[in-house]
Image: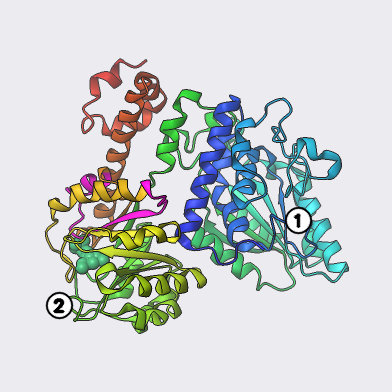
Amino acid sequence: MMGFNMRYLELKRKIRDVRMWAIQGIAEAGSGHPGASFSAAEIMGSLYFRKMRHDPKDPGWQERDYFINSKAHSAPGYYSTLAVAGYFPPEELRTLRKLGSRLQGHPVRYSEHQKHHSVPGIEYSGGSEGIGLSVGVGIALASRLDGKKNRVYVMIGDGESNEGQVWEASMAAAKFKLDNLVAVLDRNRIQQDGFTEDIMPLDPAKNKWEAFNWHVIEVDGHRVEQLMDALNKASQVKDKPVMIIANTIKGNGVRHMANTPQWHGKAPPKKHTPVLLEELESEAIIAPSIIAGEKENYEQKIKKAEREGVEMIHLDVMDGKFVPNTTFFADTIKKLRPLTPLPFDAHLMIERPIDRIQDYIDARCDIITVHAEACTEDEFVQIQGRCLAAGISPGIAINPKTDIPDWLLPHLPDLDVIIIMSVNPGFAGQKFMPEVLPKMVAVNKKLRDHGFRGYIEADGGIDAATLQQVYDAGARIFVAGNAVYGNTDIHGAVIHLRHKAEVALERKLLDHATRLSVRADWMKARKNILIPYASELKIEEELNAIK
Ligand code: DX5
Ligand code: ZN
């Protein structure tokens, strides 16, 4: 059986892979729907990689939960999700829409009879939209009549919601109190060639579904922690079907494809694929460290960070022995946990973490990182094993003078994060140590060469002046203590850090496009995105010359 315990960073990595396979298929085919494939990636990923009971080795498993993809044009993203989940080899995405391929433009329900143009795991033949919810109502009703516990998930679009049949099905589901049915609205506000609110306004969507007697939960549809929170809450609702309104961005993941109708059903040039893949692998994650700034007041700090849309909270646990400072321990984290679904990134600067690891597992951290200097290989393997078993992302940290221990290399495949300290641990607000940069570059290469697919986290003195340097050295998670909480304007501080990460990304992609001799073509496709960074990237003239 799949999922259930997938770790936060592994889930993010899998969803990243989904986008990467989908874009390869679409570019190779020269056609397809990147917009919807990307807006729905976290929705489908959270369902297939974590929430749903299903088994890729037994697609017909009688106890399985059902997923009905009613917005069928998101097929490339859907196929990639099934492939990354293990239903078929992801490489097959490169045959998308080709004659004789099993992966055609719109999904076909799998059966022995249809196996030549379908793949195991597809429950519903989609194409003409507006029908999937009715099918979901039928399956949910039948399951209940058969006394079965299967849950039914139906993903619909907001353009599709123009269809009257959607509302007929909605009434029926409420009439039959189908609390085994969950619909997820991929609310990306774009349909075909325009914006939904211009074509057929759906707002206020929440009121509409509540008026049809559904229990409605609204979330950011690109935040897996919010989606998982909503899906788990939906499982508790009785006597009502549940609608999860997932606010998403069409084309999310590739900046020049995001939130614009033109990428609804258009393929990028194949020659751009390597650059697009690099972009999809380069999401920047900001993690404010709550020990920085004013003393304690952790709740306020977490709330402020959440309002600024950061990706996770960095929790520096210091025992006064491993480092010359004491902060807080698992009991404090336990108290903070109910405050937010934001992932907790626990950085344990303690002696003998093997003796305390269960406390941090029980405190429901999403990531637990221990120091290589504080444990033996055997102890680390135990710690890693217990984190994995608990669905927690294991990480290891190295101090500025420490190199990656060779004993770690065999354990890399199940390691999600490596913290490379750029200050001697113990306090926030210290000065960044540039001498760690060459090590970070070398460690990044060594790790990738040994199959590491996780994240490098830069921790210590990261701010608007140093972020690009660690970005270029391979970091993708950026701890920011003083840069955020040492600042009266937290909003401005987070925006500034993001801006620096974006400049570093655009420079990297431009360099890649140049190496591939597609610079001008890439700049043309990316023009609107590049304009705000033109002076920092010193490309004003070049950009102005592009018509
Ligand atoms: C230092 C901690 C860091 C620190 C970050 O030992 O591990 O996370 O709090 O704070 P700044 O960003 O201010 O260096
Ligand atoms: Zn830290």
Give the vertical position of 331 relative to 468 (above or below). Answer: below
Q: Is residue 517 left or right of residue 159?
A: left
Quadrant field for ligand 1: bottom left
Q: Is mark 2 within 8 Å of ligand 1?
A: no
Q: Quick one: quadrant of the N terminus?
A: bottom right
Distance from Cα at disc 2 to Cα at disc 1: 60 Å
Q: Position of residue 156 (x, y in %)?
A: 67, 48
Q: Report x, y in % for residue 174.
A: 77, 63
Q: Residue at x 79, y 44 (%)?
A: 109
Q: Residue at x 24, y 19 (%)?
A: 541
Q: Amino acid at mark 2?
A: Pro
Can residue 490 be seen here? The reply is no
Q: Residue at x 80, y 51 (%)?
A: 134
x 50%, y 34%: residue: 260
Range covered by the magenta-colored residues: 449-471
Residue 223: give its label. none
Which secondary structure lies at badge 2?
loop
Asked whether residue 80 is in view, the answer is: yes
Q: Is residue 453 magenta?
A: yes
Kindly identify which residue carries mark 1. Answer: 170
> In this figure, which colouring scheme has been used for the structure?
rainbow
Give the residue type that dot 1 points to: Ser
* Mark 1 neighbour class, 10 Å CA radius: few under 14, some 14 to 19, many 20 or more: many
Residue 324 circle label:
2
Q: Quadrant of the C terminus?
A: top left
Residue 357, position as x, y percentages in the image: 38, 79
Left or right, 141 with reference to 100: right
